[in-house]
Amino acid sequence: MADILTQLSNGQLLMVNSRKRNGLILYKRFHAEFAGPGAAVGSFFDLDCERVLPVGNLSLVCPKSPEERQKAYLIRRQWIRLTQQLTDNPLPTQRAQMILNQFDNYFGNEIVAQVPDDAFALLVGVLPQTIAKIRQTSETPYVGDIS
C-alpha cells in the first residue's frame, strides 16, 4: 500500500483496471472516496490522500491515451456521484445500509467482510459503530471489521 500512496502523493495518474471487479478506497482527512473499475486515481485529485485500501484484487494501470485519461476522469466522477446519492439520505442507518448493500451487490459478502467499518463510515458520513450495528442486524451475513 505504501507504493500506491507514494505514487498518488507524487501526482502520478493511474486508473483502476476496468476489466476486473476491484477498486480503491482513498482515505482523505475527513472522508473517504471510492474509485471503482475504470476510475482515475492520483494526479491532482489525490494529493491529499492519507491512506488507501484496496477492494478486491486491485489492479492499477496507466492510461495509454488522452482519451483514456478523460474517460477515467469521467468514471471517477460517476463513482463519486453514486456515493453522494447515498449520502443524500438524512438517516445515518439508511446510509450505512445502502453503502453495505451497494458493495455487497458489486463485490459479494467475502470482499465486503474484509472492508473495515471505518472505511464504509467515512464513505457515507456515519460513525463506524453505525456500520457495525447494521452489519450485526442485517440479513446479509457481514462479518464486520476484520482488521
Image: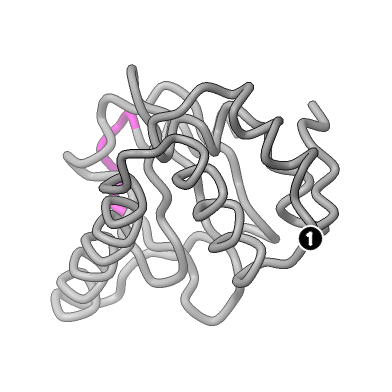
Q: Residue 63, percent across and down?
A: 31, 69
Label tally? 1
User: In the drawing, does residue 105 fall left or right of residue 89?
Assistant: right
Q: Residue 110, percent across and down?
A: 82, 58
* Residue depicted at 22% across the width and 44% down the height: 43
Residue at image mark 1: 109
Quadrant for the N terminus in the image: top right
3 or 47: nearer the viewer? 47
**What secondary structure characterizes most of the magenta part?**
loop
Is residue 37 depicted above or below 9 in this figure?
Answer: below
Amino acid residing under circle 1:
Asn
User: In the drawing, does residue 35 fall left or right of residue 55?
Assistant: left
Using the rendered view, name the quadrant where residue 107 is placed. Answer: bottom right
Magenta segment: does it hold 101? no
* Residue depicted at 66% across the width and 63% down the height: 104
120 or 127: nearer the viewer? 127
Give the magenta part as a residue range: 9-13
83 or 27: nearer the viewer? 83
* Residue depicted at 46% across the width and 69% down the height: 37
Is residue 19 depicted above or below 96 in this figure?
Answer: below
Using the rendered view, name the quadrant where residue 106 is placed. Answer: bottom right
26 or 6: nearer the viewer? 26
Is residue 2 depicted above or below 59 in this figure?
Answer: above
User: In the drawing, does residue 49 fall left or right of residue 121?
Assistant: left
* Disc 1 secondary structure class: helix
Q: Residue 118, percent across and down?
A: 58, 26
Residue that protrudes farthest toward the top in the picture: 29
* Residue depicted at 59% across the width and 28% down the height: 130
